[in-house]
Image (tube, rainbow, N blue to C red):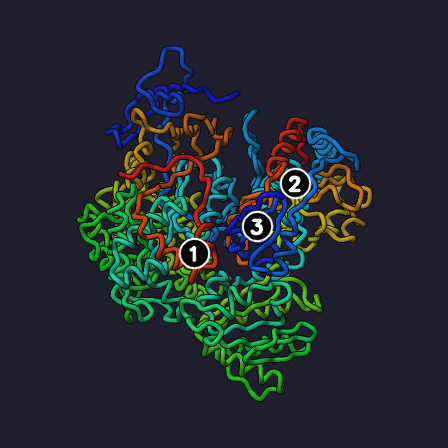
Amino acid sequence: MSPTSRVASVTCLGCGCGCDDLIVEIAGDRIASVFPPCPVGRAWFGDGGVPWAARRSGLDSTLEAALSDAADVLAPASGRVLLVLAPDVSAQVQRAALALADLLQATVETATSDPAAVGLLAAQRRGRTAATLGEVRNRADAVLFWAVDPGPRYPRYWSRYAPDPAGTHVPAGRAGRTVIAVTVGQDRGPAGADLELALSPDQEIPALSVMRAVALGNQLGELPSPLQRAAEIAGQLVQARYTAIVHEAEPGAEPARDPYRAEGLLGLAQALNGPSRAALSTLRAGGNRSGAEAALTWLTGYPMAVTYRSGAPEYRPASRGVAAAAGGAAAILVVGAVAALSEVFWDAAGRTPVVVIGPRASETLSPVRVAVDTGVAGIHEGGTAYRMDDVPLRLRAPLAAERTAVDVLAALLAVVRARGVPRVK
Amino acid sequence: MSPPARLRIVGGAVHDPANGIDGDSRDICIEDGRIVADLPAGAPTLDARGMVVMPGGVDIHSHFASSSCNHARRLIPDEHAADPAPAPKLADGEPLARSGTGGSVPSTFTTGYRYAGLGYTTAFDAAVAPLTARHSHSELDDTPCVDGGIFVLMGNDEYLLRQVETGERDRARDYAAWLLRATGGYAVKIVNPGGVEAWKTGQRNVSSIDDQVSGRAVTPRAILETLTDAANALHLPHPVHIHCNNLGVAGNSATTLASMEAIAGRRAHFTHLQFHAYGGGGGEPWSSAAAKVMEYVNAHAEVSVDVGQVMFGSAVTITADAPVEYLLYKSSGRRWTNIDIELETGCGIVPLTYKDKAAVSALQWAVGLELFLLSQDPWRVVLSTDHPNGGSFLAYPALIQLLMDRSVRDEQLKRVNPKLLAGSALADGLAREYTLNEIAIITRAGPARLLGLRTKGHLGVGADADVTIYSRDPDLATMFSTPRYVIKGGALIVEEGYLRRAPAGRRLRVAPGYDDALLPDLRRHFERYSTVAFDNYPVADLPGEPVATA
């Protein structure tokens, strides 16, 4: 019988909630249980078993030989390398990968920013009003779920942030808050709301415009019924002390509408800060995707879609996307969980040599030149990950790692530097 | 080639005001990263004859390594695109040189390189939310060439407010100490005491130091007193660092003076004073109150300030003073980011441009210069632009030129909008010109002393070997923007004006003691209201040893 142990205050990266209050029970070298029993968290941790292989062209290899082969692939391709930042690695790993990208004058795409890009771009155009999740919990007396039910993908949002918990300014918890559910077409708000608004996709942007107008104090004439209802709800938000507008940054049912939704929600939240206070709470999925954007921003000034090709970071949001970038690459380095990459990416990559460093790299279904397994952030590796609200969280590692991604990338950087990377004009 | 462990800097005109040296021709000897009295014959030399030698610059108040800065970076992709920063060509054997982007808030490596290129070797980020301190340390890890630290925001902290409310000043002191240790912080920072909490509750702001904060038995005055006393009782190397209420508001000099008087006799630093030294208000037009404010500062040795000079051109306002940023957004129509940070503080960001033809910008520019020129003690009135709020740190050389050369100042004065300058001392003609020694005081010796950094800001035996060597140039802005040599911790990092080495900076932090009796109550507070586990909150594995408290 293997001995059991418990690790407390473990951070879960199963979704962007970043709950750091988990208790993980270990039996032998496997995770036996996770408390509280959140289904997304349980799936994230699994039993903690991961492979620890290093492979060259599908065959087992020493780590040194694998890194040498990776350098053979990457160094000559300088200027035409694509770095894909995939999820499930810490900010320290993302930072180390970006050092390689800088050296190799690579193009950098994240596997996870593209879906959220419309919101990031809208925020660059007009700014944004946001809050950390604790502000939502402590202050929001009105919680507006816009076309999202957090239950399935963010199971503990409801109980940990809003509307259920008591807060400094909402001592009664759920009873002290007004919950509003907005449904837009197939994008449904949560059940059990105090107020509801159902909109067809075509009514969404007009409704946001009406609500913003109410927040700005504009006088409106007679409106058709769903818009009139939207105006009434906006009137309630104006009367609230602090409104949290919760929305999903991952694509909705009609992605073509997302840029307008993002812009409309940003505008509404900003306008509500005239007569009242309001913040947008943006739901992001797991795996430290906000961390990739944070590290990219502090190192390049841009949160996504960066190329170092000219010798300094350039922003190319209009041509963003891993698949688009893969098509023109001479070599690809994926750092993180390769499962996040779609078939479209692998089709675009074609015969381009691919190096994968990250959790379960050796289980990549598509053929890759080099695969080096590392641990998973927050399970086998410590460091920092970012919650969906950009709060940096401490990661503990309940299981031991045979090697860490930070160390592997540092070793690869040293090998590539030793080869001498030609600067590309 | 690795830098020599020994170096004799020969024959420069040394400006080391902390040691009473004012332009004397002297040798400066360096061994193992420190200034030493002498070196054996045959030690490597650097010929500085005809040049000006000063300690490395020390930036007492800047915003360059924080979560707020990162939000600001996201907001200005246009500025980054206009200012690409290729990797410098470092000497063989150096860490990987990194590219980046500039603009008002450069990327991290570029920030370090540009500080070094300016002759600055120490800098503090002046406003870090404790919750995001982990992020700041990540940025500092990637900001080479400068020793750095962070000031920790406490003036609107929920737990602190509760202690103030109940008169638990000892516990407030212990909490401040715990927070500094947990965050790897260097100093206690107050921003708009109580005003940010008021913004978050819907009260919008406070307008005097005796306003109640959101109906609670807490006033800005009580917050100021509590944290000023806490910092002094903890014998922190730097006293409480105060951003007063009513920043940027006409007539705010009354609040500033009331704040100073509230803690009179107690050591305190008032930051970016320019933004708090306006007359007018109540129906009267804006005017300068620099003379009145500086009269108080000159007469009170316990008070120190940095100026927060406005320089014409692009800037990004980044502050925890979120209600101010809302007003700026409404008045300017520019992009606006607001982030409310749980239980602690806020964050507001608005990019803007200071125009010499805009009356308020011109007044702000004049007020800053007046504060400098009316100062009677440069050791207590030191240089800052509140980077990037009043302008970039890259504008320091142009500011130095304005201080040292009246003709340049007067020429610029002729071009600015005079509408609000009636009665200003600058418009009436301030003839003072700073000397090189005074510049050395306000840019390195003074800030180092105010920060309690005993081994910085001077070139005496035992000091850190942080040295900046300038070629003389009749154009003072050119002289100060392109040092010929910069030495950091004994390593020659700038040679002939080019960055050649980029060592990691040292982390400057304190670890004051506190009574453990605080912890059970603090843990309960976290468990009830925080979304981060108490045991996960402290930043672990910080580099280096804490700076000693007295």
- Residue nearest the observer in this picture, B190 or A220: B190
- Dot in front, 2 or 3: 3
- Dot in front, 3 or 1: 3
Q: Chain of mark 2?
A: A
- What residue does disc 3 label? A25
Mark 1 to mark 2 CA distance (whole Å): 53 Å
Mark 2: give few (<14), some (14-19) or many (20+) Cα within 10 Å: many
- What residue does disc 1 label? B355
- Residue nearest the observer in this picture, B236 or A337: A337
Q: Identify which amino acid the numbered label 2 is placed on.
A: Thr
Mark 1: give few (<14), some (14-19) or many (20+) Cα within 10 Å: some
Is residue A405 something that shows in the picture? yes
Compared to residue A173, the image places residue B12 above or below, namely: above
- What residue does disc 2 label? A374
Find residue A396 and report its horizontal and vertical position in percent. 53, 46
- Disc 2 or 3, which lies upstream in sequence? 3
Task: Classify mark 1: helix, strand or loop.
Answer: loop
